[in-house]
Amino acid sequence: MNKALRKAIIAGNWKMNKNRKEAAELIEALKPIAADKTCGVVICVPFTNLETALNLTEGTNIEVGAENVHFEKSGAFTGEISADMLTEMGVKYVIIGHSERRQYFGETDATVCKRTMAALEAGMTVILCVGETLEERELGITEEIVAKQVKVALSKACEKCVKNVVIAYEPVWAIGTGKTATADQAEEVCAFIRKTVAGMFGQDVADGMTIQYGGSMNEKNCAELLAKENIDGGLIGGASLVAEKFGVLLEEASK
Ligand code: PEP
């Protein structure tokens, strides 16, 4: 399938940044920048900013996402937020399995699978993050690690609902470090992810899936990465916090 037929999505991951006033300022700055772009535009914001983001993006081409979701529908899970709570607000996207959650909050492939199913069942689009650590890359087991992450996360998904999954390949060693994977390294793993998805759900599903790269992607290096056949956009941390920088990524992904 031709890359041009897939939906390129640039998604910002604000992480634990921006209070409500700062969030509103950033969104207001983003709106005119995003307005004429043809790629998908998503901002994944802290829970405290969801309401602000939903209100301010109403009627625009900017979609709003959360940065995590719990797998149960409701109950005694202090501090957690369910998929139904998010969809009731109007939140459409959710990041699941980000490496920071795997590293600091005990996220495992099994819990990523449970969260993914809860979000899909609620009708959300999941941005599923996978990627190897530096040690795993140096051991030559990148493909093994990434295949396992994809296979476990999507083990319970059906062919129909997997169409609401975007996979973000994010090498852990490139996130927030200023070290980007080379365009060839990123392309190689994104192509491998597509092959893995094809093995699970068939070539058509794999060909239609948006597979992003994430890891220190910015206004300077995005053109080379986004030009690659298997890279359909990006999950962007640092550069999503500055409207002008995010705008360059949107521009490039809309070409
Ligand atoms: C991320 O948080 O998903 C990310 C890719 O961060 P950064 O762009 O800052 O490396």
Image: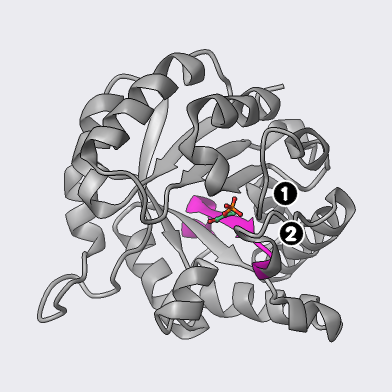
Q: Is residue 162 magenta?
A: yes
Residue kind at label 2, given as amino acid type: Arg
Of residue 109 and residue 17, the one placed in the foreground of this image is 17
Residue kind at label 1, given as amino acid type: Asp
Q: Determine which residue is flagged by label 1.
A: 207
Query: From the Cβ of disc 1, is ligand 1 less than 8 Å away?
Result: no
Circle 1 crowding by C-alpha within 10 Å: few under 14, some 14–19, many from 20: some
Residue in view at x 43 percent, y 23 percent: 30
Q: Is residue 163 left or right of residue 43?
A: right
Q: Quadrant of residue 225?
A: top right
Q: Quadrant of residue 83?
A: bottom left
Q: Quadrant of ligand 1?
A: bottom right
Q: CA distance from mark 2 to mark 1?
A: 7 Å
Say above or below: 211 vs 192: above
Q: Label 1's element?
A: helix
**Sequence-earlier tag: 2 or 1:** 2
Q: Position of residue 242 (x, y in %)?
A: 50, 33
Q: Label 2's element?
A: helix
Q: Which residues are magenta?
A: 159-172
Residue in view at x 65 percent, y 49 percent: 212
Q: Determine which residue is flagged by label 2.
A: 194
Residue in view at x 66 percent, y 60 percent: 177
Q: Which mark is residue 16?
A: none
Q: Position of residue 186 (x, y in %)?
A: 79, 56
Whether label 2 touches label 1, CB < 8 Å = yes
